[in-house]
Amino acid sequence: MRKLDRSLANYLLLLYGGLMIIGLLLVIFPQWSLMAVTWLLGFGALISGAISLFLFWKNRKDGGNSLLLFGAVLGIIVGILIMIFRLEIALVILPSLIGVAVVASAALCIMASLRYRELRVSSWWLPLIAGAVALTVAILIFLNLSSTVSLLTRIIGFYCIIFSGIRFGECCTVKKYL
C-alpha cells in the first residue's frame, strides 16, 4: 500500500506540473492555445483516467480507493468526449465541462482535506484551500458562460495555475507521510 501511495504522489506531482504549464498557455495565448489545449486536455484526461484505473486495479486487493476509481472513470469519459467534439467543445461545451469538473475537483479536495485531518496530517488545510479556489472558479465560469471565449480561457488558465500550485505543494507535503 505504501508503495502505491508513493507512486500515486509522484504521478500527481507530474499531473499538477503539467496542469500549471497548460494554465500558463491559456493565460498567455488564449485564442491560439484553445484548440491545442483542447487536444491536450483530451489526451491528458484519457491518460490520467487510464493511470488512475491502473492504480485502482493494482490496489483492488487492498480494498481499492473509490475516489481513484471515480477519477479514472470521469477522466476517461471526459477525454473521449473532448476528442470526439473538439471544435464544439473548444467554443461552447469546454467551459461548461470544465466548470463541472472543477466542482467535482472541489468536492474531492474537501473530502481529501477531511481525511487528512482525521489522519492528523499537518497540511490538511491545503486541499481545503484548493477546494475553495475551485468552487470560486466554478462560480466565475458559470456566471460568465456568455462572455467571450478569451475571458473564459484566461479564467480557466488562472485556475489551472493556482489550483495545481496548491495541489503540487500538498503532494510535496503529504509525500513525507507516506
Image (cartoon, helix red, strand yellow):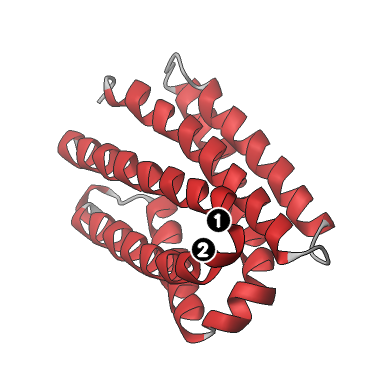
Does residue 176 show up?
yes
Q: Residue at label 2?
A: 33
Horizontal and vertical percent for residue 23? 51, 48
CB under 8 Å between discs 2 and 1: yes
Q: Crowdedness of circle 1 by 10 Å Cα count: few (<14), some, many (20+)?
A: some
Residue at 45%, 64% (x, y): give it: 41
Seen at 73% across and 56% down, the residue is 151
Side of 138 where 176 appears, left or right: left
State the residue at coordinates (39%, 59%).
69
- Quadrant where the image shows the C terminus: top left
Residue 107 numbered mark, or none:
none
The answer to which of 8 and 143 lies nearer the viewer is 143
- Say what amino acid the circle numbered 2 marks: Ser
Q: Position of residue 77 (x, y in %)?
A: 47, 74
Above or below 60: residue 11: above
Q: Specify the quadrant of the image occupied by residue 173.
A: top left
Q: Nearer the viewer, residue 67 or 105?
A: 105
132 is higher (above) or lower (below) than 34: above
Q: Which mark is residue 29?
A: 1
Q: Is residue 105 visible in this depiction of the protein? A: no
Answer left or right for 74 relative to 172.
Answer: right
- Secondary structure under tag 1 reads loop
Local packing at callout 2 (Cα closer than 10 Å; few below 14, some 14-19, many 20+) is some
Q: Is residue 177 left or right of residue 157?
A: left
Where disc 2 sits, the SS reads helix
Q: What is the three-letter code of the residue carrying label 1?
A: Phe
Number of marks drawn: 2
Q: Quadrant of the N terminus?
A: top left
Residue 22: horizontal and vertical position, in percent?
A: 46, 52
